[in-house]
Amino acid sequence: MNYNFSVADYRPQDLDRKWQARWAEARVFEPTEDPSKPKFYCLEMFAYPSGHAHVGHVRNYIIGDVIARTKRLRGFNVLHPFGWDAFGLPAENAAIKHGIHPEVSTFGNIAHMKGQLQRLGISYAWDREFATCTPEYYRWNQWLFIRMFERGLAYRKRSTVNWCPVDQTVLANEQVVDGACWRCGTTVETRDLEQWFLKITHYADELLAALDTLTRWPEKVLTMQRNWIGRSEGARVRFALAEPIGGTDGIEVFTTRIDTICGSTFVLIAPEHPLVEPIAAAREDGAAFRAQVNRFRTQDRTARISGEVEKEGLFTGRFAVNPFTGEQVPIWVANFVLGEYGTGAVMAVPAHDQRDFEFARKYSLPIRVVVRPADGEAANPDALEEAYSDDGVLVESGEWSGLPSAEARARMTEHAKAKGFGEGTVQYRLKDWGISRQRYWGTPIPMVYCERDDIQPVPDDQLPVVLPKVAEFTGRGASPLAQVREFVETTCPKCGGPARRETDTMDTFVDSSWYFDRFADPHNDTLPFDPAKVKYWLPVDFYSGGIEHAILHLIYSRFFTRVFRDLGLLDHDEPFLQLLTQGMVLKDGKVMSKSKGNVVDPDTMIQKYGADALRLYVMFVAPPENEIEWTDAGLEGSYRFLARVWRFVDTWCEAVRGVPLPTAAGGDALELSPAERTLRRRTHETIRRVTADIEERQHLNTAVSAMMELVNDLYAFAPPDDRKAGSDGDRVERRSVLREAIEALVLMLSPFAPHTAEELWERLGHEGGLAAAAWPTFDPAVAKAETVVVPVQVNGKLRGRITVSPEATEAELREAALADPAVQSHIAGKTVRKVIVAQGRLVSVVVG
RNA sequence: GCGAAAGUGGCGGAACUGGCAGACGCGCCGGACUUAGGAUCCGGUGGCCGCAAGGCCGUGGGGGUUCGACUCCCCCCUUUCGCACCA
């Protein structure tokens, strides 16, 4: 593309280089704690160093940078750091495939991506940069893990876990999406393994309740977290066994509908239920029974993905006693009962639960109606087409009959408690977080197994447990660390005898659950962070990142914040005050990805148009939350706008340099022409709009629009061609209002287009760069219009406009409106029934 | 099925607590400047009727509240996202 300008060339690439070098040299983005200034912590989710950042990734960093740069000019002490979420599977998989050690590829990728961000001019405090894969960082994962272990918040148990056969590792529940691995999409299998868990459920109630305090989070994310935690109030009820099974004499069930218990005609247990094995053992056909139950266990995860699984069950031959009716009810194993939720057993009430209803119909089990609609008759069980699962009034329930459901629940729960066979309880869907991973490229779990002393944590003074170099990555067999003899073989910290190290590593989400605290004090080698520094900087004021972290990262971080709080290291509850989830950048209607070949590389765009045009385009095209479709034409439009600003300011900067501002002392002595007053008004209106759009709503697109409008006004006010042709621009009033407008524009543009703005600011005669500048001040008195145009409606249709003073009274507006010729022609010969005046906004005349 | 968000020109999107629908930009059309320009500057650009002035229609569909509805209420349709046998 060949651009040539009449006045001066806009060469953004030169500006990028010049100003990036100056910023780095002057270290202008490196804050220190300063109690005299309000602080602002602006953070974008740190990056996994995958190799190359495309414009989709980069969009988020630009959003954060606009906020950070604005806040600096607004007088805040801004912390805007960046780092690398550097452990993880892709690097290890690359090692298996290409033989490059994860450490080598990771640091190579970091170097490249850091360069990309620097070329975009993102104002990061690079002094605070760190990568989570360094012992200086991950030793604090280990330290924290041991603190949690000491408090019972980290524990080991054998459990059925999600296993990804491709990644060869365990996945947390949060990492299973539609029954498949969140990373590679492979269908997840189950395995029974000894695993380390973090007790996030300890904070379930608090994590749920505190969502109400997160008023600056998107509703969507709050809803997702609420559903994920999944609190339900109900009761545990014990059904005695008709005859004991292997020393057990009862089954506990969880129900939210104890009011329907008299209609419970059978009990269902999960295939994983502990009673399954003793029942099988006592059966003559035990092997066949086990085989069938096993089929249930393996079937569900895979089959559920596609939709409904046929409900299936197997009668155990055993019976339990319904504690409310005293009746014996059969016990079945059912494929749809979840072992890991509640007690793994449910009381089935076919008349009032759709699943139980289908099951009862299939196996011809009795159906008993015990709730009728509040205003209707009890249904005939034989005629039922589906379960009636709403609340109603109890029937056929002995002494409870006639009670409304809600009251029945309370009183029947009390009864169960009084009789000792049940109690009210709260159940969560949230489960403890399994963090063991059978992989290499992660934080070693700092535990030692001793034959004599069982499980022992590594003493603090022996931390970090350093990840040993592994020479070969085969991708086969057990954890790679298990092959490293000198790592595995150790001594017991308690007895000194031979012991074995834990060879699993931690889920990488541990790394990202507290990195934002570490940024407050990134080089601390005696604690994860200095509590005083965290107290100054935290919580994060503005946090932005992808919606894909709505549950995983954002719930783990809220959990870890509470753990640190309870360790006395910090004193806030919530890590992120405001959350913005930015939309993705699409190309050709699809998410950018290397495999689809539709990646837009920021460096290519920067080479062509400069960093500022790219930044401005991505901010202007849509609000940050929206998805956007990448178009080169849109980028060119932003380039044109910057060139237009450049041309204008470059033309007039000499004429306005050093001219007293209209706001300066004595400035009110200036006698402004109407056009000059209008420009001032437009300038201040723009300041108001841009400031509010950025700070209050983060509508960065309309902030840019407002500036474009001001530039259009400026071209009309002082066409650059005038100056070229020798026109004066000499009148001091004219130059004064021009200077005010230009400087405000350059300052407001600087968060979006910092390189261009810095250069123009310098050409306007300012020293010390934008770091020494302040955001322009909005003056409501100046912004006030001298006259306003008020629309007039007749019977709801726009019929005329009147020009009046903004202070015009209701009576004046009414009079002017009725006198307007255009309005007159529509009300002539009719009776004016009503005139509504919205002061300064509109007059509405009703005739009939 | 449950939950959340959203439907506005050819396109991306504006419209604060109900008050001039379509700001701003892209694209397109025209003009100026030019040897020329895909550069730049200026103007036009929702649909229909009209030479024009002007009129009528118009924010997914249908109803309602109101002097006035993109905005509020009810019903429906569509799209996107999340959860999905949680007892």
Image (cartoon, helix red, strand yellow):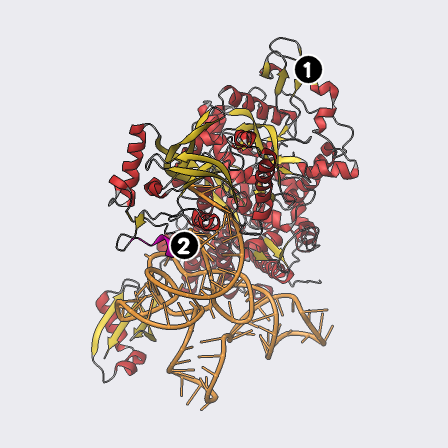
10 Å crowding of disc 2: few (<14), some (14-19), many (20+): some
Comparing B67 with A259, the one in front is: A259
Q: Earlier along the polypeptide chain: callout 2 or callout 1?
A: 2
**Element type at mark 1:** strand
Q: CA distance from mark 2 to mark 1?
A: 62 Å
Camera-nearest residue between A144 and A329: A329
Residue A373, position as x, y percentages in the image: 29, 53
Q: Quadrant of the N terminus of chain A?
A: bottom right
Q: Is residue A666 above or below residue A562?
A: below
Q: Is residue A168 above or below residue B79?
A: above
Badge 2 vs badge 1, beta-carbon distance below 8 Å: no
Image-based side of A705 in relation to A597, left or right: left
Chain letter of the residue beneath label 1 in the structure image: A
The residue indicated by pointer 1 is A490
Quarter holding residue A819: bottom left
Residue A386: assigned label: 2
Residue extent of the magenta highlight: A378-384
